[in-house]
Image (tube, rainbow, N blue to C red):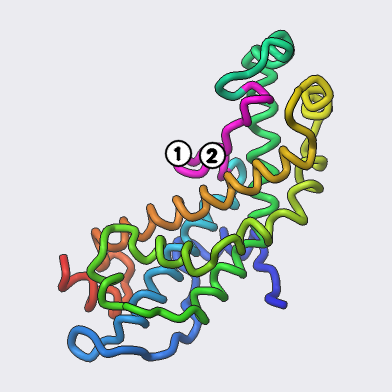
């Protein structure tokens, strides 16, 4: 079992954690391995994404990963039965903080899984990924991992939601129709998983746009030439 990476380790290491040893792969530009470049690109992108998301209010303040409330808890299309309880901004804000804190808490389980998947996944067509769009590597990672992030977060999501619940969530769930605690747990885990990939993709796009800023000679050698 992959050891969990601590929130402190991810955040305290700065924008880029030390890269683990990466295997040399298919030769690309100037003898640089394209597969190695993709793994480094995804490793740095993932480290930066998790370092941001696992900060205090990381999910809540993210414009790409923030968890929205499901309709039954006051999101778009809330039922009239919940209007009196959930329409006030104070209650909405509490609910949003609860689900976003729970997402960050559960996401700690996903961080080592993502990094391990990057190290071990098979890269079928490295050239097309290198020459692809701004988030081509992230899209490949998501396809490769399938539901792994969702599956990793689900066991801890229920405990995380209960941990941060001040009572307003339990009250809302009692009133809501069409959702229960299990349903909310799945909804938040699914949205958190999607948000993690969007956060990784944004970091990938930034690195592709300015690979020199990473200080990584492999990324600079591959993506700098392609710019």
Q: What percent of the width, then of the height, locates residue 152? A: 68, 61
Residue at screen point 26% across, 72% down: 128
The part of the image, by quadrant, that contains residue 140 is bottom left
Q: Quadrant of the N terminus?
A: bottom right
Say which residue label 2 marks: 66
Q: Quadrant of the C terminus?
A: bottom left
Q: Residues within 10 Å of mark 1 (few under 14, many from 20)?
A: few
Q: What percent of the width, then of the height, locates residue 49? A: 48, 56
Disc 1 to disc 2, C-alpha distance: 6 Å
Q: Nearer the viewer, residue 176 or 45?
A: 176
Magenta span:
58-74
Circle 2: element type: loop
Say which residue label 1 marks: 63
Q: Residues within 10 Å of mark 2 (few under 14, many from 20)?
A: many
Q: Nearer the viewer, residue 212 or 151?
A: 151
Relative to 127, is 175 above or below? above
Asked whether the residues under the numbered discs 1 and 2 touch, taking CB atoms below 8 Å apart as contact, a structural biologist would say yes
Q: Judge left or right: residue 102 versus residue 173.
A: left
Q: Which residue appears farthest toward the front when viewing the image?
A: 178
Q: Judge left or right: residue 117 versus residue 135.
A: right
Relative to 154, is 163 above or below? above
Circle 1: element type: loop
Q: Judge left or right: residue 123 versus residue 17.
A: left
Disc number placed over residue 42 in the picture, else none? none
Q: What percent of the width, then of the height, locates residue 191? A: 58, 44
Q: What percent of the width, then of the height, locates residue 125? A: 32, 78
């Amino acid at each position: 079992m992959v050891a969990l990476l601590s929130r402190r380790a991810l955040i305290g290491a700065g924008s880029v954690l030390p890269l683990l040893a990466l295997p040399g792969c298919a030769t690309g530009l100037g003898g640089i391995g394209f597969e190695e470049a993709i793994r480094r690109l995804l490793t740095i992108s993932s480290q930066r994404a998790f370092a941001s998301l696992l900060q205090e209010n990381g999910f809540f303040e993210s414009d790409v990963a923030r968890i929205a409330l499901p309709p039954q808890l006051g999101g778009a299309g809330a039922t009239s039965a919940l209007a009196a309880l959930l329409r006030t901004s104070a209650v909405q804000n509490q609910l949003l903080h609860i689900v976003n804190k729970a997402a960050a808490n559960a996401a700690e389980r996903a961080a080592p899984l993502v990094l391990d998947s990057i190290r071990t996944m098979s890269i079928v067509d490295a050239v097309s990924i290198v020459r692809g769009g701004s988030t081509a590597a992230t899209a490949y990672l998501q396809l490769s991992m399938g539901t792994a992030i969702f599956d990793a977060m689900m066991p801890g999501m229920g405990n995380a939601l209960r941990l941060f619940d001040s009572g307003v969530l339990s009250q809302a769930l009692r009133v809501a129709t069409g959702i229960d605690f299990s349903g909310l747990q799945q909804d938040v885990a699914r949205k958190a998983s999607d948000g993690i990939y969007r956060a990784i993709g944004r970091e990938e796009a930034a690195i592709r746009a300015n690979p020199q800023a990473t200080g990584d000679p492999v990324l600079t050698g591959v993506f700098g030439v392609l710019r």
